[in-house]
Image (spheres, rainbow, N blue to C red):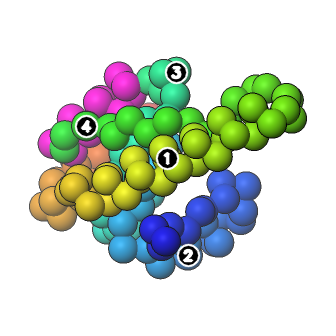
Amino acid sequence: NLDIKYIDPTNSVDSILASITSVEILLTEAMHGAIIADALRVPWIPLKLYDHILDFKWRDWCLSLELPYEPQNIPSLWDNSSQNTSLHRAKNVLKKQQIYYALKKVMRTVPPVLSKSSIIEDRTTRMLEKIDLLKASV
């Protein structure tokens, strides 16, 4: 048992925030999950399950907070096939085992990420200063 809790992104905002704050470490493929976790001061580990994930967005955000972006590649569980053959079911069982061991390895070996509070404070101050400048120019 990996003691992993799935956070359904279709749940209410309050439910999602409560779920994120209830975990020790958030494993996330979604950059928004990492942003929220970091803001709530919950350490996180970036995962990459699909090739279409845009690394440049992650890198840009991580760079702004002086964080590394080193996503952990995990095989995807889902495919678009609607097959229900014995072979397909057997492949899914093997795939689930592969994912289980990949996640177990990540949880055992990968240090979670969390920005420094001083950097968050600095970026917040800079943002508020820019907002004040914008308001003054209007």
User: What kind of residue is marked 2?
Assistant: Ala
Task: Please say whether residue 27 is visible from this viewpoint.
Answer: yes
Q: Report the side of 1 relative to 102 (left or right).
A: right
What percent of the width, then of the height, locates residue 63?
Answer: 21, 35
User: What kind of residue is marked 1?
Assistant: Ile
Residue located beneath label 1 in the image: 99
Residue located beneath label 3 in the image: 52
Instruction: Estimate the spatial distance between the alpha carbons at disc 1 and disc 2, rounded to whole Å.
Output: 26 Å
Which secondary structure class fits the magenta region best? Answer: helix
Q: Earlier in the sequence, mark 3 or mark 4?
A: 3
Residue located beneath label 4 in the image: 70
Could you tell me which residue is drawn at 59 percent across and 63 percent down?
6
Could you tell me which residue is drawn at 55 percent across and 68 percent down?
5
Q: Is residue 113 above or below residue 80?
A: below
Instruction: Estimate the spatial distance between the alpha carbons at disc 4 and disc 1, rounded to whole Å.
Output: 18 Å
User: What kind of residue is marked 4?
Assistant: Glu
Q: Residues within 10 Å of mark 2 (few under 14, many from 20)?
A: few
